[in-house]
Image (cartoon, helix red, strand yellow):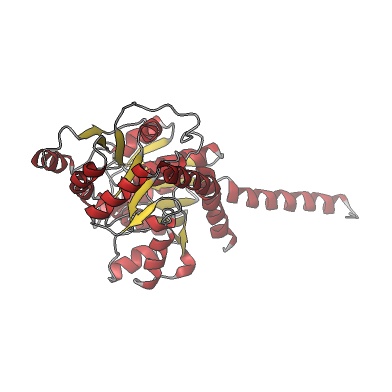
Amino acid sequence: MDFDSPLQITTFVLLLGKTISDKLKYYVLTILHTESSMGWGGQEIRIVNESAGMARRGHRIIVAAPVNSNIFRRAQDAGLQVLPSEFRKKNPFSVFSAVSMIDGIKPDIINTHSSSDSWVSSMAAKLSRTRPKIIRTRHLSTPISRSFPSRVIYDLLPDAVMTTGEEIRQRMIRFNGFRDSKIYAIPTGIDICRFNPDKVEPAFRSDSFAVGMVGVLRSWKGHVFLLRAIPDIVKHIPNAHFYIVGEGPQRENIEGIVRDMLLQDRVSLLGHREDIPEIMASLDVIVHPSYAGEGIPQSLLQALAMKRPVVASDAGAIKEIIMDNTTGYLIESENPNRIAEKVAVLYQRPELGEVFGENGRRLVVEKHSIEHMLDKIEALYRELFDNE
C-alpha cells in the first residue's frame, strides 16, 4: 500500500487502531451474570464454572446474587467478583437498583438465569444507558407456559437464549413458538482433567457392588424409584450397597422411605460432597431415574467422564448423552423394575460396563469438555456483536 503524504499515513494508522479496538471488544468482554436462586445445584455450579473459565480466558466477569445465597459465597471462593443484589419481581425499586448497578459496571453482556433476576435484570438493561446484550439461560426442561409474560422474558427482551440441551431448545421452538434463530443449545461442559479415571483414587473401597445416585435431593430426580428397585436388585446382587450423594429438600422424605422399607443396612446417605470424582471412582454403577426438570445433568457427564456405566431415564435432554446400549442404558421414567433389570445386567456382564465407560469418556472428551462449552459460548458472544 502506497501513501502520498504523512496525513494519509496518520489517517490509516488511526483507522487501523479503531478497527483493532472495535474487534477486541468482541473478544475481551465484561459479562455480568445475575442469579436469584438461593440453592446450590447443577444450575449454580454451571454459572460458577462457566464464569471462572471465561475469567481465565481474559474476560471481566461479575456475578450478582443475594448476599446470603450459596452462589454468592461459592463465586467468591472461586476468585470471582461478586456483587450483593436482591431481585424482586414487580418491584420498581429493585429494577432501579439494577439499572444503577448496570450503569456502574457497563457490561457488554448480561446473562440471566432464574425467573426473578431475569425479569429485573432484563428490564434494567433496557432502561440503562449502556444497553448491554441480554442472554437468558434456560437450565431446566420443565415446560414454559404459552403466556404473554413468557414470550416477553424468553422471546422479546433477550438478544439470545441459551439452553443446556437441544431437547430444551426444540421444545421452546415447537411448543412455545419462540424464534429459533435466537435460541442456542450449549450443554454444560466437564473438566476432563479433574474427572479423569486414570488419575483419581476412590473415596472408599468396599467388597460390595456399589450402586449410586449423585445429585441434589429433589423430588423429580426420582430417588424414590431407585429405592423401590432395591429389593429386586438385591435378589440378583446379594452384596449390593446403595449410596445417595447430595443434599436437598427431599432428604427427610428419602430417610423416611429408607426406614419404612427397612433398608438402613443397604443405603448410605453421604450428604453433600465436594470429592465427586473420587465418589464416582468408588461406584460400580450410576443410576439417574429423573422424570422431569432435566437439561443434560452434570452428574451424568461426570459419570461418563469417569467411565462409569449408567442407567438413566429418558427425561429432558438426557438422551443426548445416554445413548441406549452405547454409553449406558436409557429406560422409561418411573419404572423401578427396569432399573433393577439393567443394574443386574451390568453386574452380570462387567465387560459391557467397560464398553459403555469407554464410549462415554470419548463422548465427553470430544463434545462436552468445559473448553468445548466455553468455545461455543464465545462464538455466541461474537455472533451477537457481529450482527449489530
Residue 179, placed above or below residue 54? below
Q: Nearest the camera: 1 or 54? A: 54
Residue at the image position 38 percent from the left and 55 percent from the top: 318
Q: Quadrant of the C terminus?
A: bottom right
- Quadrant position of residue 143: bottom left
Residue 44 in the image: x percent, y percent?
35, 43
Residue 323 in picture, x, y percent from top left: 43, 56
Residue 339, percent across and down? 27, 51
Count up the numbered dots.
0
Q: Above or below — where is 365 with respect to 210?
A: below
> Does residue 132 appear in this view?
no
- Give 374 or 326, whichever is nearer the viewer: 326
Quadrant location, the N terminus: bottom right
Q: In terms of image quadrants, where is residue 38?
A: top left
State the residue lying farthest toward the left. 260
- Toward the viewer: 182 or 349? 349
Q: Identify the residue shown where x is 34% and y is 68%.
A: 151
Give 127 or 23, whichever is nearer the viewer.
23
Looking at the image, residue 128 sits to the left or right of residue 86; the answer is right
Q: Where is residue 287 in the image (x, y as percent from the top left)?
A: 31, 46
- Describe residue 14's horizontal placement relative to residue 79 as left or right: right
Residue lying at 23% horizontally and 47% vertically, measured from the top left: 226
Q: In screen coordinates, is 268 left or right of 310?
A: left
Query: Does residue 205 sit above or below 119 in this rendering?
Result: above
- Residue at 22%, 52% (x, y): give it: 336
Residue 149 seen anywhere in this rendered image of the structure: yes
